[in-house]
Amino acid sequence: MAPPVNQTALHPQGVETHYSHTELEEELYETAHIDYDKVTISHNPSAAELYEDALVHESGSAITSTGALVASSGKKTGRSPKDKRIVDEPSSVDHVWWGPVNKKLSENSWKINRERAVDYLNTRKRIYVIDAYAGWDPKYRIKVRIVCARAYHALFMRNMLIRPTEEELANFGKPDFTIYNAGAFPANRFTDGMSSSTSVAINFKEMEMTILGT
């Protein structure tokens, strides 16, 4: 048994040593108030780790005869084209082809959706963070960070995007674009601009996306 540390007259039994937090934990706290003391953050887990977490923690998960992971997505399984929104803000308003597909969302409604997504992620015991590239050409690719609550969501994005090398991951730094996936938590359908409890919204000014209700 290790001897007690930091013993004082006030704390004769000692107090717990403070452990510094990782750069990722500090960044997520700063940008999204993710409480790293309450939420376990799994950063760039392997496919095997994600399989294991899905099988252990997510009801309805299984492995097929071909080795693929089966996951229960819930009520919504598609891309919900009628629920996509783009934030109406000065830097991008003239560069979006607005219409029945690209629908406007106010900055205030965006803030509500983002807060709902982040609040939900903060209620989870564990979340997953995947760092990867969108685009293959180093000249044009962007660094993308996915923050999500389900192992199969992390696995999906790990497969969809370009996985960095170990050296690239070590020097990944801050992402160019961040996705907060809180798909198990619904949007508030009474929020201005919402048509249902599902919302997939992009904010080009903040370079962020939030996913709710799907």
Image (cartoon, rainbow, N blue to C red):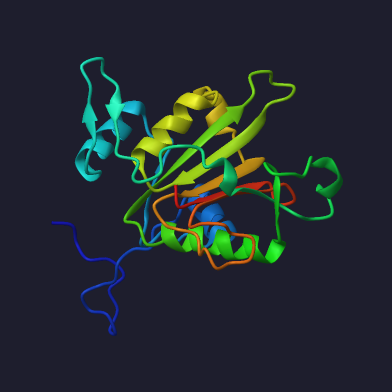
Asked whether 170 or 118 is in front, the reply is 118
Q: Can residue 174 be seen in this view?
A: no
Image quadrant where residue 112 sits? bottom right
Residue 159 position, x and y percent, is 46, 25
Asked whether 202 or 25 is in front, the reply is 202
* Residue farthest to the bottom, as pictured: 10
Residue 127 position, x and y percent, is 39, 49
Name which residue lies at 59% across and 28% down: 133
Name which residue lies at 30% across and 35% down: 71
Image side of residue 123 versus residue 190, left or right: left
Figure check: 93 above or below 191: above
Asked whether 46 or 17 is in front, the reply is 46
* Residue farthest to the front, as pictured: 100
Figure check: 34 above or below 62: below
Report the number of numbered marks: 0
Name which residue lies at 46% across and 29% down: 158
Name which residue lies at 32% across and 34% down: 50
* Residue farthest to the left, as pictured: 1
Image side of residue 205 versus residue 144, left or right: right
* Residue farthest to the top, as pictured: 66
Residue 53 position, x and y percent, is 27, 39
Residue 49 position, x and y percent, is 30, 32
Asked whether 164 or 208 is in front, the reply is 208
Q: Is residue 31 visible?
A: yes
Quadrant occupied by the N terminus? bottom left
